[in-house]
Amino acid sequence: MRDAQKPNQFTLNNLLSRLKEGRFVVPDFQREFEWKPWDISDLMRSIFLDYYVGSLLLWKGKEENFDALACEPIYGHIGGGSSEHIVLDGQQRLTALYYACVAPNVPLPDRANRAIYFIRVDRFMREEYDGAFSYDWKTKRLEKLTQDPSIQHEEHIFPLSVIGAGGWAMPTWVQGYMKHWQDKTAEARELGNDEDAELFQVHADNAEKFGEELKSLTEQYQVSYIELDKDLGLDKICDIFTQINSKGVRLDVFDLLNALLKPRDLQLKFMWREARGRLEFVDSSKLNVYILQVMSILKQSYCSPKYLYYLMPGHQKTIRTPDGKTEKEVLVHTTDEFVALWNTSVTALERAIKMLRHPQEFGVTSSKYLPYVSILPAFSSLQEHVRTLPADRRLDGQRKVRFWYWAAIFTSRYSGSVESTAARDFQNVKSWIDDDSKEPPLIQEFKTRFKNLELRRETKYGSSIYNGIFNLLVLNGARDWITGNIPENDLLDDHHIVPASWGDANLQDRSVHSILNRTPLLDETNRHVIRDKLPNAYLPELIAKNGESRVRAILESHLISPAAFDILMRESFSAADFEEFINERQRTYAEAIESLLIKERLDLSPDLRDLDERIEIAELSLRAKIETALSAQEGAFPQHVMDKVRQRLNRAQRKNPAFDKDYYATIGGMLEFCDLQELKDIILAKANWQTFSDTFTSKEELSKRVDQLAEMRNGIRHSRTIDEISRKDGEAALLWFEKVSQSV
């Protein structure tokens, strides 16, 4: 049996050619084709997103076996062909592929009409994958669309049948699509419609990129298969088929690589067994594949299944050089090199898991509070990359990886196409580490989206945002309510602040189970302090034993603000009080995300964190004062300040397509791109000083105080040691600005 199994791959082009030629047949005992149109569309989506779609199990055919099993062509195939393989596993996938790309003129079983499958190119290029892959029934309108490429180009509809047509059909379509939008771009420019021209040019540029995607997909996407020898007995074939379909056994990429490596004296399954104990904190059946993905990311920056096969020692990968030529590349030359890369990747995952568990790094107290298991390959690979940086760059590299991690968690980034997302994130963050100007769009999205997180609805235990908030509380140093100490991480669990029993009886929704009403506590604390009592009952008991100021301080470590504390203490606690408490905690969480994660004050001591927040308030107050005073004045900014602001605005606009140009053309918007020294220069400008002289009195005093404040702020923000004199001067400057602000 070992000699009969020959793991191999078809490229998509090759597979479609074989399907059209009738090389595959289906035995009579196979079930009928059962997939629905949306199943077919989902398969094409998976292929285009470079997902692994499973392996085929094929039996090399011979005439007597074709006859014995009463084999028939793939559903929809018309005419004869040179039958070559009997499909034992993969009939539904092969038929779906044939139906979508070859588009036989027959309806699906139990359907009166035929479906046409297509890609909405504009959505695909915007990575709106859920809406990019679609189908429609063949109507008169659709018939016209499928016959007229100009309509397809205008509506950004690429019929998948173009792929199946072969020959020059696909490049011809792409060239036509590109020319369509190039012509429209030129026309719009002639009419002076720059906005339309810009949009049309994006479509034209995307046409070329889409063509490259198609070419890469058809030439490089691989569908793996296991070929059973034609002389294998029919009884064994039937037994294999029965076992596969009755027990749901499927060969995955790890199993296939294991099979391929056996002849090279590499026992991948044994290597995995040795590694498993080092990674046991994470409970996932995919950890063995994650090791392979880390290997692949470190070697080639990609980790989708087809790229994992390039890790085979001596396996050649086709790459395209900058001049458009193709050449062969070997990523892993020997089995020793494979083993070394495997060990590096296991160690990278082990280090990453240890870091995630650290209460002052990421706060994942147990595997059930890991927001995404699927983020591990990208996170581990980035951490490993940072380790390779020169010593003076590692701190900044680690800071950026940390920022990316939280951005991914609070934007639910790893809830979709994981492999392609991981590869893209690794490349983007790596580029950002090397060049500050290449900040990934995800970072800006996070800075905006966190304000709109609707945490009230986060009641699903184990969701990414739910777990992320739980981690945030650990990071904030949530202390035990009985001892006042930070408890052992692995003993923490999340418990209700207002008891669930009260909420179920008094609230009309499930908000009592929201993460806003939960916090990490020891089971013992929950049993002995909260039980089923309302906060207005158990908090006074804590206060009586420990004093109010101490209890308030402990609850603040759980992001229960003084205002929220007062609400919980109300004598007659009602549904309205609970609503007020929830709203207050939502506000507190938003502030905490901004402070701890976005402004990265996590590493600051509490006193420095307080100073940093006060400095920011003073700076915001100063900007507001300038905006109010100069809003109606033209040329309010000195030229050297204006030049710097424009440079920063242009850089920000290049990085963020959604940049609000109108807002940042206002004084208020431009002031956001000014530092303290530039704010000082604006106030001290000859044309402006008269406006501010009553407030700041002395140019010399203002200049001195800004310099002192900036020195302390820069020291805090850049993690520099602040000497006692600089700190005292900075604190004095801060008091001066606070006094000035109050007097205005």
Image (cartoon, rainbow, N blue to C red):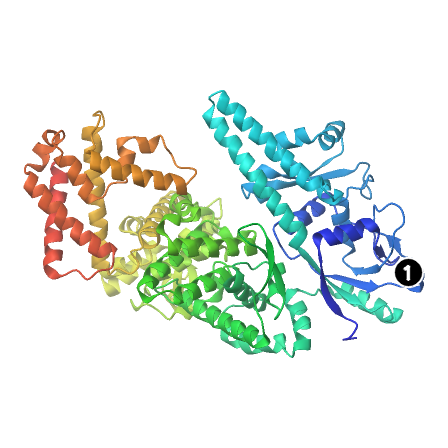
- Looking at the image, is 522 positioned above or below residue 553? below
The type of residue carrying mark 1 is: Phe
Of 422 and 250, nearer the camera is 422
Across and down, in percent, residue 81 comes to 88, 51
Residue in the foreground of this view, choosing between 305 and 183? 183
Above or below, 407 against 488 in this view is above
How many other residues sit within 10 Å of disc 1, few (<14), some (14-19) or many (≥20)? some
Measured as percent of width and height from the top left, residue 659 is found at 39, 37
Q: Is residue 160 visible?
A: no
Residue denoted by label 1: 66
Residue plotted at (25% across, 54% down): 717
Q: Which residue is rendered at x = 61% and y = 41% of the image?
A: 132
Q: Residue at x 50, y 27 (%)?
A: 196
**For residue 474, which quarter of the picture?**
bottom left
Give residue 606's position: percent from left, percent from top: 23, 59
Q: Residue 393's quadrant in the figure?
A: bottom left
Q: Nearer the viewer, residue 309 or 632?
A: 309
